[in-house]
Amino acid sequence: LDEYLRSRHTEDQKVRLKKEQEHLRPVPARQMEVMCRMEESPASLHGTVRINKSIYSEPDSAIGINCRTVMGPYEVQIYRIDGPAQWIATHPTKPEGESSVLLEHILPSLLRKPRALIRWTHRELLFPHPICKKFYSRLKREDESGAEREFLRSINLIQYLPLSEILVGMELILETESIHLFEDLQSLLLGERRPAEVVAISHRLGQ
């Protein structure tokens, strides 16, 4: 063993080890004595699970399904366990009390009951940029009763497009006199008339 190690203790190996060490991260300090924690529970009606005091979202398809949430030092892995274990979501591990909720996970459930937007605990997640609040206000001006649903449908385009493109589209639509804001936004971003430069002008939003 000593001879084996000496043969590999070369200058080249030292350089390679130094380069590799640059990519290593220290294990974060943990209050728990173990490096991971595991909980099993069904997802809530909004598609979330709780571990300790933190909440993590799951895809809409996991609502009501028994899930295993494994919290490691860097990542939280969520698996469905009705039948063979199947991975369904990954989140960065959050400090105690903080949450990781992805729009693409929870929007489908909110769309089924759009009035819940008003009292939803994580409501601010739906307005990641000031342009979103302007778009929502314009929707309320055009149709007070349907504004929540139309706004959720607009943000739900994140299932197909990056958020940056949706924000640019909202800004462009607000510059028009449109009264069919969602339909025009959808046509702009997903329809045949979608302008190729819609991403290029994202600097207008500071992206």
Image: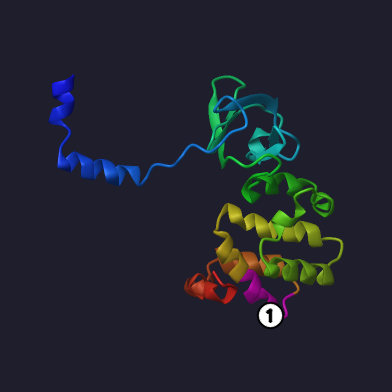
Q: Position of residue 133 (x, y in %)?
A: 74, 67
Placement of the N terminus among the 4 image quadrants: top left
Q: Is residue 128 above or below residue 138?
A: above
Q: Which residue is mark 1?
A: 176
State yes or no: residue 177 in magenta.
yes
Q: Position of residue 2 (x, y in %)?
A: 17, 21
Do we see residue 68 in this rendering? yes
Q: Residue at x 72, y 36 (%)?
A: 53
SS at badge 1: loop
Question: In which quadrant of the rendered view does residue 171 lie?
Answer: bottom right
Q: Residue at x 28, y 44 (%)?
A: 18
Q: Is residue 79 above or below residue 25?
A: above
| Magenta stretch, residue numbers | 169-178
Dominant secondary structure of the magenta stretch?
helix
Circle 1: residue type? Thr
State yes or no: residue 49 in magenta.
no
Do we see residue 180 in this rendering? no
Would residue 24 appear left or right of 116 to someone viewing this image? left
